[in-house]
Image (cartoon, helix red, strand yellow):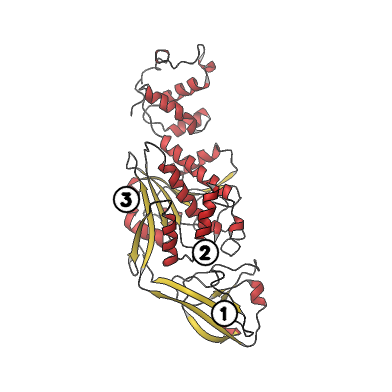
């Protein structure tokens, strides 16, 4: 998986993504090689909840020419150099005017910041603090950005894996940032490869919905169409972001925790032996804000590695390939898959032998003779499972009482099905 993750990363990295436009569409097209995405176009000017889809942005070039004739802030070298959604400009200015349109970070002087202006028309460039400090204060600067806005649409992608039930599990990620690694590409890549793993699950119980959308406005557009459906059908959901750095795991709970999403994720982390931290819901994060908004109150959390704003490279040119570990990214995919497996297994099972314990010997299931405490592990686990199969107790709770991972009951559940000890 690691090699294939890296290959797709290298193809997606150069594209100038935004909340609309061809860079976004091309990224979704590449991801469609892994996930059969259905693409939705929402026209500019469409009202979506309390928002409106902005005009589509396009850009071809951008640069500054210094008084000495040197080109800097060249969009063709780094697409972070132009403020995302910038207006076009072609003029000569003095340094005093130019400085009002330059953005840099004092606390990370060697990095180019990532700045957007989706809802306010302005032009601008992003530059490292070191390069800004070295600019001549005298003379004329030529500024040029070949970009603009037009009536178009916002694009988001969606894929649904049908299960035997219409109850749903959601995995959502955003596709809108230009060249950033952990804060952008790790999420879509993890989600796409997770799709491949879940698609291979035989006899899926749940229906799985995968959403690839521009952050905030894209998910708001998605919710304007599908939010009420999710409110009725969703059992658990997760936002995938910051999935690929070398840090330990962080799980951010849903707003109405403890929800099913939270309990399953925290259980899987507990028995994974991986270092992790659990944090409560708070605004200032990603699209869980939209899913957890009061009208929907969906059970959506987020499993990450180092969260946004908690690593110094965040929203700068330093969030590049060197920040990623493709083995760590693959590990995140596998942990999400473990969550899906736990969700599939968790249920309120009902025994067909509710009065007294079932006679295991006649079914060839009794491992040893003697006191129940001395029974072989699998037999004891089976009896523990049957004793909680009252049609009301979730297997997650039964596993916790037994002191082991829910996935350790997979073979017990299968055995009970084969011997018709539980109802289908």
Image side of residue 106 versus residue 202, left or right: right
Vertical side of 145 occupied by 169: above or below:
above
Mark 2 neighbour class, 10 Å CA radius: few under 14, some 14 to 19, many 20 or more: some
The residue beneath circle 3 is 229
**Which numbered disc flags the more N-terminal residue, 2 or 3?**
2
Whole-number angstrom distance, CA of label 1 to CA of label 3: 49 Å
Camera-side mark, 2 or 3: 2
- Give SS at disc 2: loop
The residue beneath circle 2 is 14
Image side of residue 107 versus residue 201, left or right: right
Mark 1 neighbour class, 10 Å CA radius: few under 14, some 14 to 19, many 20 or more: many
Residue 409: give x, y in percent of width and height: 47, 29
**Which numbered disc flags the more N-terminal residue, 2 or 1?**
2
Looking at the image, which residue is at 55% across and 45% down?
A: 331
The residue beneath circle 1 is 64
Quarter containing the C terminus: top left
Vertical side of 316 occupied by 415: above or below:
above
């Amino acid at each position: 998986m690691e090699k294939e993750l890296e290959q797709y990363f290298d193809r997606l990295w150069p594209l100038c993504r935004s909340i609309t436009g061809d860079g976004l569409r091309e990224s979704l097209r590449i991801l469609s090689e892994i996930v059969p995405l259905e693409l939705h176009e929402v026209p500019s000017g469409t009202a979506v909840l309390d928002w409106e889809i902005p005009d589509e942005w396009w850009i071809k070039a951008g640069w500054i020419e210094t008084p000495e004739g040197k080109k800097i802030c060249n969009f063709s070298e780094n697409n972070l150099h132009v403020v995302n959604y910038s207006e076009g400009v072609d003029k000569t200015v003095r340094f005093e005017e130019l400085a009002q349109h330059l953005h840099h970070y004092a606390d990370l002087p060697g990095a180019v910041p990532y700045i957007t202006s989706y809802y306010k028309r302005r032009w601008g460039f992003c530059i490292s603090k070191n390069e800004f400090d070295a600019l001549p204060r005298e003379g004329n600067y030529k500024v040029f950005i070949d970009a603009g806005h037009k009536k178009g649409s916002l694009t988001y992608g969606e894929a649904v894996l049908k299960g035997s039930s219409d109850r749903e599990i959601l995995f959502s990620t955003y596709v809108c940032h230009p060249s950033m690694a952990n804060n952008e590409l790790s999420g879509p890549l993890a989600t796409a490869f997770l799709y491949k793993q879940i698609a291979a699950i035989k006899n899926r119980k749940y229906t799985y919905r995968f959403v690839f959308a521009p952050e905030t406005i894209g998910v708001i557009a998605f919710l304007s169409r599908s939010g009420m459906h999710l409110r009725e059908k969703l059992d658990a959901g997760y936002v995938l972001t910051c999935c690929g750095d070398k840090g330990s795991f962080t799980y951010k709970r849903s707003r109405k925790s403890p929800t099913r999403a939270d309990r399953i994720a925290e259980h899987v982390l507990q028995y994974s032996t991986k270092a992790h931290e659990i944090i409560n819901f708070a605004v200032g994060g990603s699209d869980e804000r939209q899913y957890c908004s009061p009208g929907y109150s969906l059970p959506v959390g987020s499993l990450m590695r180092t969260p946004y704003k908690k690593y110094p490279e965040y929203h700068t040119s330093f969030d590049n390939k060197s920040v990623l570990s493709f083995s760590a990214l693959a590990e995140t995919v596998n942990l999400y898959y473990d969550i899906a497996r736990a969700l599939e297994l968790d249920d309120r099972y009902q025994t067909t032998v509710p009065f007294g314990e079932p006679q295991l010997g006649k079914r060839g299931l009794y491992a040893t003779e003697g006191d129940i405490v001395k029974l072989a592990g699998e037999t004891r686990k089976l009896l523990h499972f049957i004793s909680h199969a009252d049609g009301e107790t979730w297997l997650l709770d039964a596993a916790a009482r037994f002191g082991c991972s829910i996935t350790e009951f997979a073979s017990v559940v299968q055995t009970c099905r084969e011997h018709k000890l539980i109802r289908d």
